[in-house]
Image (cartoon, rainbow, N blue to C red):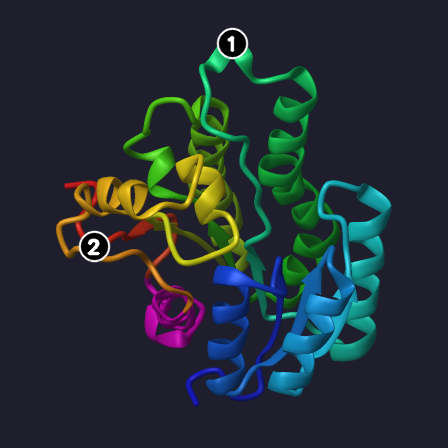
Amino acid sequence: MRLSGKTAIVTGGGSGFGAGIARKLAAQGARVMVADINGEAGQMIAAEIDGIAQVVDVANNDSVAAMADAAHGAFGTLDILVNNAGITHLPMAMEDVSEEEFDRVLAVNAKSVFLTARHLVPAMKTAGTGAILNIASTAGLSPRPNLNWYNASKGWMITATKTMAVELAPFGVRVNALCPVAGETPLLASFMGEDTPEMREKFLSTIPLGRFSTPDDMGNAAAFLCSQEASMITGVAMEVDGGRCI
């Protein structure tokens, strides 16, 4: 119960890696707000872990402000923020991605981190404590072709993590990132273009440990980085990738 008494928000917590992280934080004693644009999915995970659900569009300022108000109203003090919500464009040549798709990827994957910082960091600074975890990707470290703008958004998140860590360290707030390889989540088919045995074999051949990341893998790493056991760790982009980036 390394997170006993702690409070947390997990964005995109209704499915995939976010659900795995929400489950693990709760199992370790945290009270968790499952924030998701899909209200039904968020409610299901929240009910499972005895948490609370919040509908949020992480790319919308007013929606993120409402999430922050709801969290502070329910918890009083927020200890942990997990910026997990993310999307991708389908694999294609960089010049073929539409402007609308580009804007959407950058809004959900990058602007969201700005918005949650805007509405949640001030209270963490005042409290003098907190842990922020940004879910980046191996795509930001070792990019695959034809996912150019998704890769770039995750590289942005890694740089944002490091500069947030330096700026917030004097206030007692730690900021880290996780970099998973493709996993068994709703985004897997989008990364591959199509979910076929052949495409899975192609992807798995690039992962030395021979399997995809799982929500449990992400939950385990997140629980550690958000706990006092990691009190001297800030600004890292931890690879949870089975050796993909070696």
Q: Secondary structure at mark 1?
A: helix
Magenta region, residue range: 216-232
Quadrant of the image containing the C terminus: top left
Quadrant of the image containing the N terminus: bottom left
Residue marked by disc 1: 95
Look at 42% across and 85% down and name the residue there.
2
Percent x, y of residue 40 = 75, 68
Percent x, y of residue 99 = 66, 16
- Residues under numbered marks 2 and 1 in contact, where contact means CB atoms less than 8 Å apart: no
> Mostly what secondary structure, the magenta segment?
helix
Percent x, y of residue 103 = 67, 25
Comparing 97 with 74, the one in front is 97
Q: Which mark is residue 242?
A: 2
Q: Is 222 part of what is drawn in magenta?
A: yes
Q: The residue under label 2 is which amino acid type? A: Gly
Look at 60% across and 32% down and name the residue there.
105
Q: Secondary structure at mark 2?
A: loop
Percent x, y of residue 142 = 28, 32
Disc on the earlier residue, 2 or 1: 1
